[in-house]
Image (tube, rainbow, N blue to C red):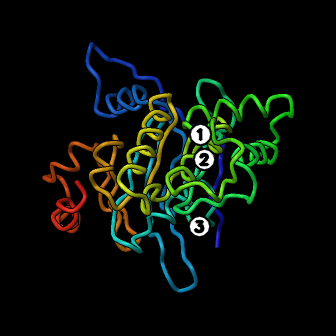
Amino acid sequence: MHRVANTRAAREPGPCIAVHGRMNRDEAVDTAAAARPPLLVSLRGASVRFGPLAALERIHLALHRGDRLALVGANGSGKTTLLRLLHGLAPADGERTAYPLAPEGRPLRAAMLFQRPFLLNLSVRWNVLVGLWLAGVPAAERHARCHRALERVGLSTLAARRARELSGGQQQRLALARAWALAPDILFLDEPTASLDPGAKREVEQVIGEFAADGVTIVMSTHNLGQAKRLATRVAYLEGGRLLADLPVDRFFDGRELPEQARQFLKGELPWNT
């Protein structure tokens, strides 16, 4: 099995040259590509297998800076595996390219939150500080970054409390604070509100929306289609490890461009989750 390529050299589109005031189709495509935000991660024919099981099959996907991509589909469709693949945590056949952040030119920083965040049996403050220490953040910066992160998610007054004594929504906000403190360019979220009550769900959604408004690229899996409508700019539908649709959020929920499987998914799920 070949590991996914992790090439740093960006493949920039060539210059667009007008001939006699007109462009051919290839030049028009180059112009459209150049107008898009910079690429962060791309997958080309990427497949993931667990023994005989094909978890993902020949996925083609491009993630651009500023995207808010929601992954939807039934249980077992490959959403979590795709998150891990985009993050570089899943070995695969095919190609995964992680591009330097443009225009800064430095490697990408990414963080991932799982459905049930792992919290140390320490205080709220020390859960963030340990994360910063593991990431190699200089000691002189850690306390200030920790304080800003806890303030950002509304937990600064609970900094001394044991993290495992927090409510479910507070624990998820702490996990978001720990990730935000690392200043990620991409935040991968695996069903971040799946086990939360409606009030906690709104709080976590608000934090995610604020992070996105600050320019953090968001990729999240969710069963809540109303949440995808609220938070995403793109929605991708997976079924049986295959990516069957990837559309802007308004065109996805319009339904007319979707394959039949995705339309049936919308009809079955949307009334329960709006």
Query: Residue furthest toward the left?
Result: 256
181 or 48, nearer to the observer: 181
Query: Residue furthest toward the top?
Result: 21
The residue depicted at 39 percent of the width and 25 percent of the height is 35
Density class for disc 2 (Cα within 10 Å; few <14, some 14-19, many ≥20) is many
Q: Nearer the viewer, mark 1 or mark 2?
A: 1
Looking at the image, residue 21 lies above or below residue 7: above
Q: Are marks 2 and 3 in contact (CB under 8 Å)?
A: no
Looking at the image, residue 15 lies above or below residue 226: above
88 or 32, nearer to the observer: 88
Q: Amino acid at mark 1?
A: Leu
The residue depicted at 20 percent of the width and 50 percent of the height is 253
Q: Are marks 1 and 2 in contact (CB under 8 Å)?
A: yes
Which residue lies under the disc numbered 2? 174
Q: Residue 92 shows which numbered tag? A: 3
Task: Measure the C-alpha gap from mark 1 to mark 3.
Answer: 38 Å
146 or 186, nearer to the observer: 146
Q: Please, what secondary structure does the residue beneath circle 3 have?
A: loop
Which residue lies under the disc numbered 1? 155
On the picture, is 133 further left or further right than 34?
right
- Rendered location of residue 53, percent (x, y): 50, 82
